[in-house]
Image (cartoon, helix red, strand yellow):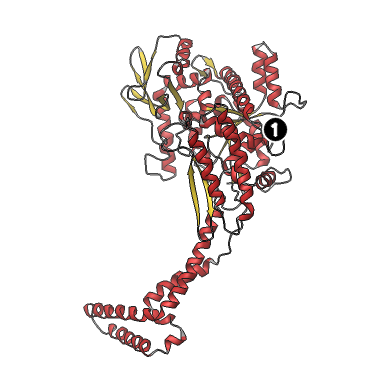
């Protein structure tokens, strides 16, 4: 039976949640490392430990090269604290590791170098991070520093581009709303790695719309931070625009370089690697082939653990948390995506025959692997998929992604709420498919609001006003002013209503209905005499609702880090990782 997941909740107030608490995560990381070193199974024809070490070298090398490319674009920050140059004397674990690898021609020495050093991994789509996402990067850096390891951020550019926009507050004198400004339009079916901006107008328009919204925040409570919001966004966008002018038009490079510029302000020096680059390594090809060659077993385990999870959590939809993998006759659905460059992501299927396995998207896209082919030639064939004219892309889905990375690359993986919730299913699949205890992972999130004062609201008074407005329609005589209560017509209508109510008590159902209709008519007449009182109450309620709407806009946790005042961010994260702080909430 699949493990019941911890009930993760987003903090409503400005709090940070770590599971396990920060005081325990160092030991968790080292325990994982020790546990993984005892894994003993083969991946096709290679012992796991050898393949893991080789994969770590491959991925670290790719991450190092990619990060160097990004860092070459990054401009200096507010305080001229751009990352170290070649003359700096202090070297991090990253620098030391690559010096050891590059100085050694002995493969044994190179493998030992990556085996010894802890790798702290996290990841997210290349989007506009809010603080609740960004804390994973801070935690990866913090943990890597404390265990003398390497922090790595996986850029999930294989996900569908459903978050290509930015949330912005609009707090005007008479209204408060949350606006969405699109950076990418009408490309939700494409992976992020397929998104690029050939037209400068798109990038410029995005900047202009964001700045205009910032300027339109003219509520007195907001005016004091508008300039800080604009400075933060200009700092971020300046980097994005600079990268664009250097010829990098893909969304991944643009947003990653802009984020990295902000991270230099916090001393964060994690490596970066996109999923699209991860999928060009020998380790990934072996992982894919291992599942391909044992697809029937994998699908049965996958679907069983998924159904166990649904049963435990009383989920009745077969689509949630994600669909089963399908298997019918000689066709088996794999936990991967398959598509051609420029196209939309498709599911990946394997069709098994006596001599070969055809990998297809169920339509025209696909390739064939011969069963009698040497494994090294098959790996070479997979490596050439993106080199052909059709440029076929093979990418892992969510569970396959974290499974590969947790087993073959990292010593600990840092999840947000979504990933942590469903990776308990991954744990159960790993246990049964690979017959090992999965390494533990960390879950974290934080809530940080823009530094704007909320408005005082008496919620009980709002509830009372709402009830009074309803009662003013049903029993208007109760709400008349003293002057109205002396009005002859008012008194006559109220008395007639009282008499009708008395009659209702003495009549049958049919007659009571007629009397009730007469009472409703009288209520309308009486209500006309308390219109001013009703309007005053209504205005009071609307003013309260405006305050509620204002506070909802202010206390929204998904505004991007690029519109926060730098001091607000620094104070928050300094508090989270304070050495004297031992008040972490735990799920």
Q: Where residue 21 sits in the image (x, y, percent)?
A: 64, 43
From the viewer's side, name the closer residue of 98 and 430.
98
User: Residue at the location (70% across, 32% down)?
Assistant: 82
Residue 189 higher or lower than 558, as above or below: above
Residue 453 higher or lower than 136, as above or below: below
Q: Where residue 474 sits in the image (x, y, percent)?
A: 37, 76
Q: Where residue 455 sits in the image (x, y, percent)?
A: 58, 62
Looking at the rendered image, the quarter that the N terminus falls into is top left
User: Residue at the location (44% across, 71% down)?
Assistant: 467
User: Residue at the location (51% across, 21% down)?
Assistant: 284
Asked where in the image residue 66 lies, by quadrant, the reply is top right
From the viewer's side, name the closer residue of 227 and 357.
227
Asked where in the image residue 88 lies, by quadrant, the reply is top right
Q: Secondary structure at mark 1?
A: loop
> In this image, 350 relative to 565: left or right?
left
Residue on which the image places disc 1: 82
């Amino acid at each position: 039976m699949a493990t019941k997941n911890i009930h993760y909740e987003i903090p409503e107030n400005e709090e940070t949640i770590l599971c396990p608490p920060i005081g325990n995560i160092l030991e968790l990381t080292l325990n994982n490392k020790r546990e993984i070193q005892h894994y003993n199974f083969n991946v096709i024809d290679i012992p796991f430990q050898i393949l893991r070490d080789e994969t770590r070298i491959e991925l670290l090398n790719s991450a190092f090269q990619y990060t160097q490319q990004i860092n070459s674009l990054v401009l200096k920050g507010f305080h001229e604290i751009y990352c170290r140059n070649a003359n700096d004397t202090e070297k991090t674990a990253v620098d030391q590791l690559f010096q050891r690898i590059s100085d050694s021609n002995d493969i044994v020495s190179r493998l030992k170098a990556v085996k010894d050093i802890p790798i702290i991994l996290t990841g997210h789509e290349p989007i506009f991070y809010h603080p609740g996402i960004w804390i994973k990067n801070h935690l990866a850096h913090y943990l890597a520093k404390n265990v003398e390891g390497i922090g790595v951020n996986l850029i999930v550019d294989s996900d569908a581009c459903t978050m290509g926009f930015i949330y912005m507050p609009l707090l005007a004198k008479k209204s408060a709303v949350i606006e969405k400004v699109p950076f990418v339009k009408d490309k939700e079916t494409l992976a992020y790695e397929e998104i690029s901006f050939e037209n400068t107008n798109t990038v410029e328009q995005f900047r202009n719309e964001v700045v205009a919204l910032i300027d339109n925040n003219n509520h007195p409570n907001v005016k004091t931070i508008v300039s800080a919001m604009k400075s933060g966004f200009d700092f971020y966008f300046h980097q994005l625009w600079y990268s664009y002018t250097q010829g990098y038009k893909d969304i991944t490079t643009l947003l990653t370089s802009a984020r990295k510029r902000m991270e230099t302000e916090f001393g964060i020096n994690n490596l970066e690697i996109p999923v699209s680059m991860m999928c060009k390594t020998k380790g990934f090809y072996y992982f894919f082939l291992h599942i391909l060659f044992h697809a029937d077993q994998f699908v049965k385990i996958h679907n069983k653990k998924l159904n166990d999870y649904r049963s435990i959590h009383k989920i009745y939809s077969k689509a949630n948390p994600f669909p089963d993998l399908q298997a019918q006759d000689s066709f088996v659905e794999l936990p991967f995506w398959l598509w051609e460059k420029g196209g939309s992501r498709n599911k990946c299927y394997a069709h098994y025959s006596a001599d070969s396995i055809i990998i297809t998207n169920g339509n025209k896209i696909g390739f064939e692997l011969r069963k009698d082919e040497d494994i090294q030639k098959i790996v070479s064939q997979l490596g050439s998929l993106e080199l052909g004219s059709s440029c076929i892309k093979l990418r892992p889905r969510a569970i396959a992604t974290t499974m590969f990375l947790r087993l073959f690359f990292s010593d600990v993986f840092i999840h947000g709420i979504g990933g942590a919730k469903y990776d308990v299913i991954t744990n159960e699949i790993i246990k049964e498919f690979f017959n090992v205890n999965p390494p533990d992972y960390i879950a974290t999130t934080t809530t940080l609001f823009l530094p704007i004062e909320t408005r005082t609201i008496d919620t009980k008074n709002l509830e009372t006003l709402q009830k009074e407005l309803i009662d003013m329609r049903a029993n208007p005589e109760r709400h008349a002013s003293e002057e109205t209560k002396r009005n002859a017509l008012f008194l006559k209508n109220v008395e007639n209503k009282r008499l009708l109510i008395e009659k209702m008590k003495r009549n049958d159902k049919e007659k009571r209905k007629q009397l009730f209709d007469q009472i409703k008519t009288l209520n309308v007449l009486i209500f006309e005499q308390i219109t001013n009182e009703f309007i005053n109450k209504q205005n009071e309620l609307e003013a309260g609702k405006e305050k509620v709407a204002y506070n909802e806009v202010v206390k929204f946790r998904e505004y991007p880090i690029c519109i926060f005042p730098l001091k607000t961010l620094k104070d928050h994260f300094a508090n989270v990782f304070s050495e004297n702080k031992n008040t972490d909430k735990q799920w």
